[in-house]
Image (cartoon, rainbow, N blue to C red):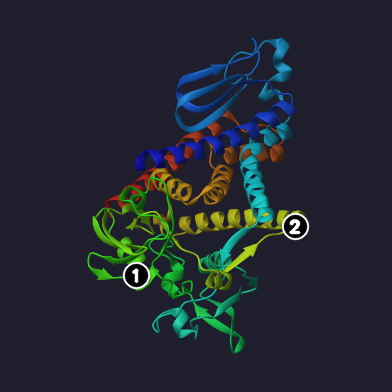
Amino acid sequence: MSILWYIGAFVLAIGVLVTVHEFGHFIVARLCGVKVLRFSLGFGRVLLRHQRRPGDTEWVLCAVPLGGYVRMLDEREAPVPESELALAFNCKSVWRRLAIVAAGPLANLLLAVLIYWVGFMHGVSELRPIVAQPSIESAAGRAGVRAGDEVLAVGDRLTRSWTDVRWALLRHLVDDHSVELKLRSAGGERIALLETNGLGDDLERADPLKDLGLLPFRPAVPPIIGSVADNGPAAKAGLRAGDRIEKIDGRVLSNWEDLVREVSASPGRALSVEVRRGEQRAQMRVVPEAHEEHGKSIGRIGVAVQSDGAWRERLLVELRYGPVEAFGRAVRQTWEMAGFSLKMLGRMVTGHVSLKNISGPVTIADYAGQSARIGADAYVRFLALISISIAVLNLLPIPLLDGGHIMYYLAEILMRRPVSQKVMEIGQQIGFTLLASLMAFAFFNDITRLLS
C-alpha cells in the first residue's frame, strides 16, 4: 500500500504539471490561429480518446504517464491542404512560433506563482527561526550562536520563519564563503559571521544547515501523541491520540525528542512500545516505515506531538499577507527559486557542484509521497517546486526541449532567415545525447540512494 501511495502521488503530480505545461502550448497556439490536431497526456498506447467532431482537437490519455505533447498542423510533419496552410504552425511568423513554444514553461511558472499566492493569502503556521544550542565545533558554534537566539536576517534577507532561514542560507551556500546572521536574544540584537566554506558543493549528501550547526530549538515536550495518521504504522498498532509512550524496547523516554530518535533509527524494525493510556498501561508492537531523507533511511510511525499552547505560541508564527503583498511575494519566490535552479545547473556544468544533486523520477516520487503524507498544503507546495524545475529544464537551450526551439527562433530573428534543416538535425542529435546523459545521471543517483 505504501508503494502504491508513492506511485499515486507521483503520477498525480506529473499529470497536473504536464497538463498545465501542454495547456500553455495549446491555448497560445489557438490564440495565434494554429490548428491543434492532438492534445495528449502521456505516451504510448492510447487508453482514452475524445473528439467532439471531425476536424476538432483530439484529446487522448496514454498508457505511460511521464509526459505529454501537443501536435499542431505543420507541413514538416505531414502534407497540409492548401485551404489550411494559414492554420499551420510553420506558416506563422517567428514571433508567434516563439510565443507558442515559450507558453509551456511560462504556464508552469504561472502555476507556481498561483500556488504561492494562494498560500501566502491563506496563511500558514511556520516555525520561528529560534536556534537550538549548536556544537562548539560547528560553524554556528564558532560564530557565537547560542540556544534561544532568533535569526532576524540572513545577509540582507529578513527571516520570519525557519523556512526563510533555510532558503536564504541555501542561496548563500552556493556563492559565498561566509554570511552575516542578525540575531536577537534576551541581551539584545547582534551580528554573527557564519563561515560556510565548502558546504555549497554537495547539497545532497546531508542537511547543510545541520552541518553548519543550525537546528530549530525544540523544548522538552513530553512524549504524548497529539494525532495519529490514518493507516500509518502507529494506527495499525492501535496507538491513539493522548497516549503517552513511556518506553521503547525497554528504554525510558523522557521527552518527544527521545521518541523521534528511537523511531528514526529503526526503519523496518519491530519496536516494543510501552504505552500509558489514562490509568492503564499497554504493550504494543510497532514497525516504523522506512523513508529516505538526505540520502539515508529513517523510520516513521505516523504520529504528531500533542501541542501545548504556551510553547506553540513561542515557537510558531502565523504568516499571512494581503492579496497585493502576497502576489509580490509569490512572484519573488518563483523568480528566486528559478534563478537558484539555473545557478545550481551552471555550477554543475563547471564542476563546482556535485552531479549527485541531480534527482530522477524515483527521488521525485519519494518526495511526492512524503509531502502527500504530510498533508495537502505540503503536497501543493511540492507541486510548485517541481513546476518551477520543469519550467527551468524546458527553457535550457538544448535542442528537443522548448528552450532549444526558442534558441532556433531567436537565431532566425537575428539572421532574418530560418535555421537550416541540417543544423537542426545536428542539434537534435546533440540534444538527444545531452538529455540521455542527464537521465542516466539521474537514474544512477536514484539507484545509488536506494542502495545506500
Of circles 2 and 1, the one toward us is 1
Q: Residue 258, labelled with which disc?
A: 1
Q: Nearer the viewer, residue 335 or 347?
A: 335
As drawn, 175 above or below 95: below
As drawn, 372 above or below 130: above
Are there few (<14), some (14-19), or many (20+) residues within 10 Å of tag 2?
A: few
Left or right of 331, for residue 343: left
Q: Nearer the viewer, residue 181 or 284?
A: 284
Q: Position of residue 252 (x, y in %)?
A: 28, 71
Q: Which residue shows up at 32% across the image and 71% down it?
A: 253
Left or right of 52, for residue 192: left
Give the distance between the C-alpha atoms of the residues marked 2 and 1, in whole angstroms.
Answer: 40 Å
Q: Residue 322, labelled with which disc?
A: 2
Q: Which residue shows up at 48% across the image and 71% down it?
A: 216
Q: Nearer the viewer, residue 181 or 129?
A: 129
Query: Residue furthest toward the right?
Result: 324
Left or right of 415, for residue 398: left
Q: Position of residue 356 (x, y in %)?
A: 39, 55
Q: Residue 348, labelled with which disc?
A: none
Q: From this viewpoint, is residue 265 visible? A: no
